[in-house]
Image: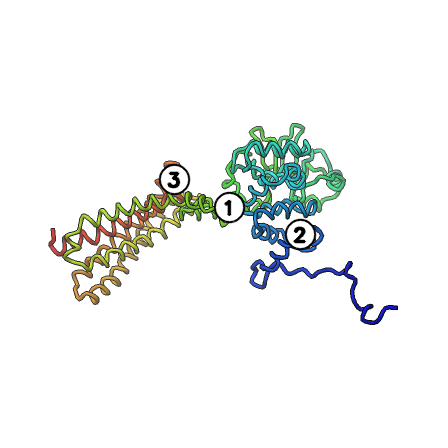
Amino acid sequence: MLSLDETEKPSPTIAREASPEPRDADGTMRSEYVEAVADAVDAADSARLKQLTEDVYGADLADLIGALTPARRTDFVRLLGPDFDFGVLIELDDSVRLALIEELPPATVAEGISELDSDDAVYLIEDLDAADQGAILDRMPSAERLSIERSLDYPEESAGRLMQTDFIAVPPFWTVGQTIDYCRETADLPDDFYEIHVVDPTYRLVGVVPLDRLLRSKRPVGISDLVEEEGFVVRADQDREEVARLFERHNLISLPVVDDGRRLVGVVTADDVVDVVKEEAEEDFRAMHGVGDEELSSSVMYTTRNRFLWLFVNLLTAFLAASVIGAFEDTIAKIVALAALAPIVAGQGGNAATQTMTVAVRALGTRELGRLNLKRFVTREIMVSLINGLAFAVIVGLIVWAWYQDPRLGFVIGGAMVGNLVAGGLAGVAIPLAVEKVGGDPAVISGVFVTTVTDCVGFFAVLGLATWWFGLM
């Protein structure tokens, strides 16, 4: 007979170890959770690993994979087996995702991405080299393989790469009842859809029927009576930024994609566009600050190479500004205060120019700035620069007057401030416009040139005015 103490002890074979929470109250990934997962991977304990990850959201799993060492990531996926959702990889940094996919067996990747929507599958393998892509695609079912290969044939960053090829298309002579029955009985419908696409026998798009309109109609009503023939469509080779602007401008949920013959080839949905907007914003932000496409997971050498060119260009522009100062060495030698005051004017002009440039680059990127409002925009920025220049000229002039007890020096710095802020305003508008005109990316190129202009103009204005005002020529 068992004693009371013995009967109260749980069986070690059925006891379940408590799982730590993935994140703390601030949303930070808990180190003890990462360590628990790492221990399970090291011990090849798939049961424990599944317990730790079974109720964890995809974004949290992505952060977890990123926190593991590269050697453990492959084992993590292998131990989870069919329970691992390859859609999680979409949330990873590009370099981590590519390295992980390249380490996994092609058969495992093929099985995993065949369960995803076609647009997600394309996103996961589009950056692999041709050999790796081929090894994965050769192991996929023919229908999924052909769908992905067709999308990969379209240009990068086009609607064809962004679209999903799983959609619902019906002929115009069907009824509402037939369409609903078709949706109920078809096993391979897309996970999310908002419209029924109506096509003719050659698969040319006739129009769409919103899902809510379909469900509110009687079963005998013909689809041709519900179809909306006038609507927005995009070509498969159209740039994805143009697609995103259509969604933003017209509050769309989904958008059909057609080829040159207006045959329906896919659908872009709002969740895909959200990712595009995020990626483009991040790309522009990194480009403006000279860090390219680097990520937290990028190697030391890659990050160094990525930043070197930008720093080198800035070094050259710094020497250009220094040459302006060098031309007025005698003036600086006689009025030493100018060495301390000139950078103030140059820096303030650079800040003002960056503000104008940011507005201009954004307006160009969203196509808000065109010939109809260009003159008004330029006039506004010049007036803003002039008013701010006059205001700061008074403020800085009075401070310099009081500091050095010399009103002439105050007038020199104040005048230079007006000139440099106006020059900065003009440069902040003109340089992005010129860069776009010649086919460049204003977000990438404009910053260094705008800064160069304000530095050179600022130093020249201060030192040139001082040389003339104090008669040092």
Viewport quadrant of the N terminus: bottom right
Q: Distance between the residues labelled 3 and 2?
A: 56 Å
Secondary structure type for disc 3? helix
Q: Which amino acid does label 3 sit on?
A: Glu
Measuring from the top left, give residue 200's x and y in whole percent: 66, 30
Measuring from the top left, give residue 377's x and y in whole percent: 36, 48
In terms of image quadrants, where is residue 396?
bottom left
Q: Which amino acid does label 2 sit on?
A: Ala
Q: How far apart are marks 1 and 2 (CA)?
A: 37 Å
- Residue at position x 30%, y 44% in the image: 316
In the image, residue 465 sits, relative to residue 238, either above or below, namely below
Pointer 3 residue: 436
Secondary structure type for disc 2? loop
Left or right, 171 with reference to 301: right
Q: Residue 279 carries which label?
A: 1
Q: Nearer the viewer, residue 21 or 195?
A: 21
Q: Distance between the residues labelled 3 and 1?
A: 20 Å
Secondary structure type for disc 1? helix
Measuring from the top left, give residue 21's x and y in whole percent: 63, 60
